[in-house]
Amino acid sequence: MKRIGVLTSGGDAPGMNPAIRAVVRTALGLGMEVFGIRGGYRGLAENDIFQMNSRNVSGIIDVGGTILKSIRFPEFKEKKIREQAYKNLKGNRIEGLVVIGGDGSAQAAHLLHSEFNLPVVLIPASIDNDLYGTDSTIGFDTAVNTAVDAIDRIRDTATSHNRTFIVEVMGREHGNLALEVGLACGAEIVLIPEMKIDWNKIVEELENQKIQGKASSIIVLAEGAGKAEDVAKLLQAKLPEQEIRISVLGYIQRGGKPSSATRNLATKFGVEAVKMLHEGHYGSMVGIKGRGIVHVPLKEVISKTESPALENLEIVKLMDI
Ligand code: ADP
Ligand code: F6P
């Protein structure tokens, strides 16, 4: 394989740039030509493609976001749009594709492979860490650190005013981000979509915290489990004596300099993805299990889900005394 393409797709994640850098430099090192596709699958469909060299990826290992841009492009669900995308790849004599993105990007990558027999490899990149087959996705570690830093700051004002804060974190319909963040910031309560919420129990826990002399509490709420403002209204009605405030972390979780763990995961994934194309391991995602790099068939990635780290909830409860 002599000519490959690379694109970033879906919600951007810190670490996409180190991954692009690793893809480009590994490909050049193997004597390949590498083409960047701007704007995810829309760029593919619109033939927004340019040849890349090593200088294009200088100075980006520590930069958040993606130099190739990313677009939400639901039109790619239409077969005729995918046919145009495939035509553009052929028109540029691009023989293989590296897709850097999340679970939606994985669906599209699988279709490109299954419908056109295109050699495709997915690099899992999402702050949600919601892809089957890998312990971590690019961006997750950085988003956890960003959210924990923000909640450490919220803890200062919560303790100063003896307030209860509900902090809403991202994660779409998964609680992975909330579970990791909640444990690391010493949250008193973590609410995730994978667990049914017993509001009477939550109210009891908050009352007991006051009896134990806890002046303030932090509740980490995964966005898939509800909106912070709704939870605050519900709890304030049941606990009129408590001062309840909210903070929605939002898009700061998607930005910032990638952490060293994110950079190194992204670089290892980028190197492996190009080697997979070079050695004929198509239609798969590169992942990590323990310290080992693994290849996971895309048809498994898109049809299965990992169970969340529910053990974190047990530990959070143990610490809440
Ligand atoms: P993420 O990859 O972060 O989950 P999205 O869900 O937006 O983000 O998916 C990224 C892109 O992948 C979408 O904008 C769309 O172009 C494409 N895509 C997502 N789901 C599908 C699908 N079922 N069929 C075809 N293309 C899809
Ligand atoms: O998938 C990553 C993510 O940040 C989710 O956690 C969040 O719900 C979603 O993207 C936001 O989507 P958008 O960037 O399109 O507003």
Image (cartoon, grey):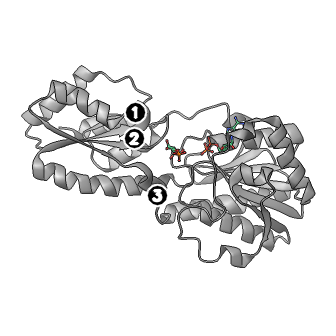
Residue 205 seen in the figure: no
Q: Is residue 271 left or right of residue 256?
A: right
What is the number of the mark on residue 142? Answer: 3
Residue 140 on image: x %, y %: 50, 51
| Residue 302 point in image, percent of width and height | 68, 35
Crowding at dot 1, Cα within 10 Å, few <14 / some 14-19 / many 20+, comes out as many
Residue under numbered circle 2? 179
**Can you tell which quarter of the image residue 149 is in?**
bottom left
User: Which residue is rendered at x = 71% and y = 57% of the image?
Assistant: 7
Badge 2 vs badge 3, beta-carbon distance below 8 Å = no
| Three-letter amino acid code at the position of disc 2 | Leu
- Give the CA separation, mark 2 to mark 3: 15 Å
283 with respect to 205 (left or right): right
**Circle 2 crowding by C-alpha within 10 Å: few under 14, some 14–19, many from 20:** many
Label 1 element class: loop
Mark 2 and mark 1 in contact? Answer it, CB < 8 Å.
Answer: yes
Q: Point out the tag, 2 or 3, that comes first from the N-terminus.
A: 3
Residue appearing at x 39%, y 41% in the figure: 179
Circle 1: residue type: Ile
